[in-house]
Amino acid sequence: MKRLEDCLLYGILDMGYVQPADVARVASQMIEGGVDIIQLRAKKFSTVDVQWLAEQIHPVTSDAGVPFVVNDYPDVAGAVRAEGVHLGQDDMPLEKARGLAGYRTVIGKSTHSIAQAMAAAGDDTDYIGFGPLYATPTKPEYPPIGIDEVRTVHEMIKKPIFCIGGIKLENLQKVLEAGAKRVVIVSGILQAKDMTAYCRKVKGMLG
Ligand code: TZP
Ligand code: MG
């Protein structure tokens, strides 16, 4: 299984963009393109349905040695033995999530400012999401924080930081020049005509 420190490109199967029947196929196309870590993000789905989706995805990621992270549902992560859980600012405490998902599970946390990132880094988190850098329809209710603080947050925190929000092939160079090392790309990948080729291009620019 790929180690978190070696993960540079983070893909999300966001069910706002993917049909339930397609999750395994999309996961394997992402992996073929070099995505290092994959999250299932199924807002407004029932626990039973999230578990079904996770069961479709996990065999594909496992075969490829790609860590699989479940957003919001630590119990599902535990049930399918996913490698990770992702929590937002308003989700349950980390210890509770770890208790439900299992002690070996990687925990990531969304942060939307340097202060939140510092707080998350001080907790028992394994990685941090930092964004949205740019405005994005994938998470429309959050004001963008821009790229000016990207370098500072990397100087202050030594845990892996994945920059997120409105990142696409077109602005990736700028984001990297601002100090990002790892990125999450959601709609850019999921709306690409050729997801594998898109991921390969992004991957070629990282590391
Ligand atoms: N958290 C902060 S921005 C975001 C999440 C889940 C959405 C990123 O999606 P996209 O389509 O890559 O802008
Ligand atoms: Mg959440």
Image (cartoon, rainbow, N blue to C red):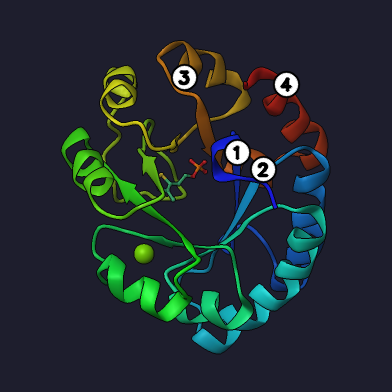
Q: Tell me the residue that label 2 is attached to.
A: 36
**In which of the image's four quarters is ligand 1 placed?**
top left
CA separation in Å, label 3 and label 4 = 15 Å
Label annotation for residue 175: 3
Dot 2, crowdedness within 10 Å: few (<14), some or many (≥20)? many
Residue depicted at 77% across the width and 73% down the height = 21
Judged from the image, the secondary structure of the residue bearing numbered disc 3 is helix
Q: Of 95 and 184, which appears nearest the observer?
A: 95
**Residue 196 spot, x, y in % from top left:** 81, 39
Side of 88 where 8 appears, left or right: right
Q: Of 146 and 184, which appears nearest the observer?
A: 184
Judged from the image, the secondary structure of the residue bearing numbered disc 4 is helix
Quarter-of-image position of residue 172: top right
**Residue 53 spot, x, y in % from top left:** 66, 75
Q: Of 20 and 37, which appears nearest the observer?
A: 37
Q: Earlier in the sequence, mark 4 or mark 2?
A: 2
Q: Amino acid at mark 2?
A: Asp
Q: Earlier in the sequence, mark 3 or mark 1?
A: 1
Dot 4, crowdedness within 10 Å: few (<14), some or many (≥20)? few
In this orientation, does residue 96 appear? yes
Q: Tell me the residue that label 4 is attached to.
A: 204
Q: Amino acid at mark 3?
A: Val
Dot 3, crowdedness within 10 Å: few (<14), some or many (≥20)? many
Residue depicted at 38% across the width and 37% down the height = 159
Label annotation for residue 7: 1
- Disc 3 CB within 8 Å of nearest ligand 1 atom: no
CA separation in Å, label 3 and label 1 = 17 Å
Q: Earlier in the sequence, mark 3 or mark 2?
A: 2
**Residue 29 spot, x, y in % from top left:** 81, 49
**Residue 170 spot, x, y in % from top left:** 59, 20
Which label lies toward us, 1 or 4? Answer: 1
